[in-house]
Image (tube, grey):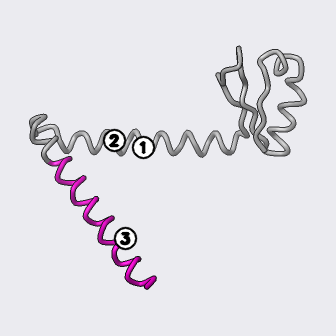
Amino acid sequence: MQREATAMTVRQNLGELLNEVQYKHDEVVITKAGKPVAAMIDIALYKSLKQDSDDFERLWAKFSRGFEAMTEDEIMDEATAMVKEARRDIARQKAQTGQAAQ
């Protein structure tokens, strides 16, 4: 379960909140002046999110290297073409789904 707690509440009840996160796998969004500034999450979730982030960074670096020899205009043209193709695919899928429903 996700809940919000002010920074002051976290300071006063850190042990209790840590137990909720560790044993109940709750999530605590910490607010300061009414705005969310941090979160307490279970370590397994943190490790999973961190691994996903690291994997994304590695893939992004690999992807970026594939475009090193292209100019910015060539990259934009390629991206525009890919977006158009994706939109055509989505429209095609929607049309097929609509036909199957009839």
Instruction: Confirm or deny contact between disc 2 and disc 1 (CB under 8 A).
Output: yes
Left or right: where 20 falls relative to 30: right
Report x, y in % for residue 92: 29, 71
Q: Residues within 10 Å of mark 2 (few under 14, many from 20)?
A: few
The answer to whether 13 is drawn above or below residue 73 in the figure is above
Is the magenta region chiefly helix, strand or loop?
helix
Nearer to us of marks 3 and 2 is 3
Q: Secondary structure at mark 1?
A: helix
Left or right: where 99 falls relative to 46: left
Q: Residue at x 25, y 64 (%)?
A: 88
Q: Quadrant of residue 67?
A: top left
Left or right: where 74 falls relative to 9: left
Label 3 to label 2: alpha-carbon separation: 30 Å
Q: Residue at x 15, y 41 (%)?
A: 75
Quadrant containing the N terminus is: top right
Q: Residue at x 89, y 23 (%)?
A: 13
Residue 60 badge: 2
Residue 32 badge: none
Amino acid type, label 1? Phe
Label 3 to label 1: alpha-carbon separation: 29 Å
Residue identifier under label 1: 56
Is 93 colored magenta in this rendering? Answer: yes
Is 23 colored magenta in this rendering? Answer: no
Residue 94 badge: 3
Q: Earlier in the sequence, mark 3 or mark 2?
A: 2
The magenta segment: 78-102
